[in-house]
Image (cartoon, coloured by chain):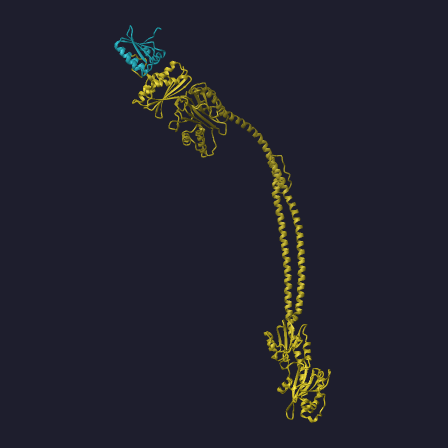
Amino acid sequence: MTISEHTDKDGIVLEVDGRVDTNTSEQLQEALLSALQTAKHVRLDFAKVPYLSSAGLRALLLGHKQALSKGAVMELANPTDFVKSVLSSVGFDKVLHIAQAAR
Amino acid sequence: MSKIFSTIKIRVLFTLISLSLGALVLLSAASMYGVLNMRAGIIRNIDELSSDVTSQRADALIAIMEYELLTTASDKATVIDEKFAAIERQTIKVAQAAARIYTDPDKYAPRAIDYLHAGQENTPVPHIRTAPGVAFGDIREEAFLAANIEDVLYGILAADISVNANYIGAESGFFITVDKNAAGPENTNYDPTSRAWYIGAKETGGVYWSDVFLDSSGRGLSLSCSMPFFDERSGELKGVAGCGAMLDSIGAIIRATNVDREGYAFLLNDKGEVLISPQILDYTTDSDGNLSPENFLESEDAATRDLAERMTRGENGVMQLWLNGEDVYVGYAPLARNWSVGVVVTQDDVLAPVNEMRAQILALRDTAERNMRKDTMTLVVLLLVCSLFAVAAAIALSLRFANRLTDPIISLNKGVQEVSEGNLNAEIAVKSDDEIGQLATAFNAMTLRLRDYIKHLSEVTAERERMAAEMNVAQKIQASMLPSVFPPFPGRKEFDLYAEMIPAKEVGGDFYDFFLIDENRLGVLIADVSGKSVPAALFMVIAKTLLRNHLRQGQSPEDVFFVVNNQLAENNETVMFVTSFMGVLEIDTGVFTYVNAGHAPPAVRREDRNFKWLDIEPGFILGGLENIRFNAMRTRFFPGDMIFLYTDGVSEANNAEGELFGEDRVPDALNASSRETASTSECVAAMRESVRRFADGADQSDDITMLALLYNGVSDAEKLTLTADVRALNKLVAFLDACLDKSGFCSEEKYAVQLAMEEVFVNVARYAYPEGGGEVRVTCACGKGRVVITTEDGGKPYNPLLREDPDISLSAEEREIGGLGVYMTKGIMDAVYYDFRDGKNVLSMVKNVS
């Protein structure tokens, strides 16, 4: 998994490429938390994330909680079908800000 | 020939023939013995008679003979003595005449007698002979005087025939004699004084008998008696007068003696010499010309010597002795001068009549014996011929008797055999009134009754057979309804199944069934219909059909029971019911879902390799009441586990004492008699054998039905062993991807499975091995549209399924970090099972394609 970070008009955009699982979620978590240190809006682009496990969910929830505590926004963009199904299976679709790209 | 013929007939024949032959032999033997005995007796009697008669006769003969001998001897002695006395008298007469002449010579004129001329034979003349050296002239005067004796001499010679010659010898040496036999002038010189007769008389001075001597003229044995004469005036011896006698005259007497045929006499003188005897034909002389007769006193034989002594002693008597090689009797009597006469007769001679008689008797006896022998032979031949006839007659009669005795038996036997071969119409034609006839009549009556009975019986049997045949068909149909080919699914290595039903005598209500509901599900059931016989069988068919059909449709076991129970209970007026146990095995997971309707609990062999009761709810019977709910239970089998189903035919098998086998014995028997690795058929066989041993020949009262199912697990699963470390996750993911290739899952489904796998793996890594370093074994059995993933780890027991589900309706603020993995897994997978088995946490997840 790789994460590329760039900024856009709202804040930081983290483009994640690859599986987010137990081994990679920490990397995501670090990138997310560090981005939230600086930006009020962190956008996670999951268009290239085919797979997400509970470890990833944990990173996402941690990031979400961090954003909430700082008054920032963590947005999950372009989740794949599988990721969407994972998110919905645990009710994260109702918790996280999910932005569906208008492609 | 029938057996009867060959035994009874032969036996009767044999007995009869033996009896008659035995009697015959005894009779013959007795006859022979009697005849032979009689013959021997007769011979013995003849012998005794002969012996008695001959010995008596012999005694008598001997007595007579002895008397005769004595008499004869005495007679002879008297006669001979008289002869000798006569000679002696003549001698005395001559001597007296000579004495007169010499005493008174003057009265006598000289007589010139021929000198030397002896005269012709038989015309003797007196003549004078002189001694040698004596001249005739010198003695002429005396000789011519002495010649006056001539007349005396003549007279005596003429008067006494026994006197042969008489003579006088003068002392002066001349000799005047008249001799009957003197022939010619041969002996011119003769000296009388030198002769024994002269010397003997001269010495004796009286009568002198000379010894027997051979006559000088060679005329035989002679004897002389001599006596001296004197000149009575002077007393001077003038000469000796003598008479010579040939012993022939006495010998004639002796020889004339004839006692019996061979008897003879002999004369013995005082010296023991045998003078006359028929044996003496020629007299032997010694060198001096003297006689040398045999002397009995000098005999070597003591008896002969004894005889001679008695005779010379002048005794008389009879004596028996051996003489001249013969057994003889000798009678003896004395003569004068101790001579003796012996009369001899041989014993043979004496006993000749006896011997003759004996010979005659013996001849008679021999003849009698020969005749008797001939008669005996004739008798034997006769007996033999008679015996032959008797034997022939006995055999013929025996044969006839045996036939008469056995013919009815043979007919009876024939009839009996005919009947025994099945011909009940056979009638025995024995008309006799004896026991055999009665037996035949009784047998005929029995046959008749048997015929009636069999007729009746065949009707009844036909009916019964028809029913039995129908029951048999029913039983066969029933049996054919039970799958009986083992192994039933040769292609399926995941499990092994064996079942059998040993029906009791009657058609019963036990049944079992098993079938694949689909590729991954095996349905098994065992049931026991209440009651027996046809109703039970019918009910069994219905129950089995319903259960099978409903289960095949894929319904859950509890639903199947519910539906089938209602169907069976409906209109169940006979109130029949079924106890049943049904289970469905999910083959790839080993999950066994089961439901029980009043049936005995199955036994299960698990990891500890001992059969134990399966945990069940008793459940209500099928067909008893409608609308009964049944609760399904679930367990999980691992490779090597076995379940053993049975009916009460096993647990209620009883032995001869009426004791029940009992349910408790079931797991014990299985454990005791089956190896840990025993196959299903071995377990069933062990159980069957255990029950058989227990029953020990007692009748089987109920069907015995058993079904054993062994779970082997999936064999073609992919396996991977990993370190329980999250860093191994990628490897696991790669393994899983490869496994899922043939699953036909879409990518999302694959991700979902990956997700579940990851969650489970991470759980193990975190919770089972908090210290790290443990191993996880992952098995992935993937078929089309279905995957079963199992993880096993040796960490501390941990059942993630017991973890409470998170509340997913909470807001982000309320949410806890983590705790979602297991929840998601359960959501993703169609089924998740946790077991702690063999010291391992075993978690299996099943995912079907959607």
Q: Nearer the viewer, residue B406 or B518?
A: B518
Determine whether, in the image, residue B839 is placed left or right of residue B358.
left
Residue B813 visible somewhere in the drawing = no
Q: Residue furthest bottom?
A: B106
Indicate the quadrant where residue B267 lies.
Answer: bottom right
Identify the image quadrant of the N terminus of chain B. top right
- Image coordinates for residue A94, horizontal then vertical, percent: 32, 10
Residue drawn at (49%, 27%) of the image: B508
- Image coordinates for residue B283, horizontal then vertical, percent: 66, 77
- Image coordinates for residue B579, horizontal then vertical, percent: 44, 24
Q: Which chain is yellow?
A: B
Numbered-mark total? 0
Q: In the displayed structure, would residue A13 be above or below residue B698?
A: above
Indicate the quadrant where residue B95 lies.
Answer: bottom right
Q: In the displayed structure, would residue B185 be above or below residue B6?
A: below
Q: In the displayed structure, would residue B320 be above or below residue B582?
A: below
Determine whether, in the image, residue B642 is placed left or right of residue B433.
left
Determine whether, in the image, residue B833 is placed left or right of residue B248.
left
Q: Which chain is cyan?
A: A
- Image coordinates for residue B850, horizontal then vertical, percent: 40, 14
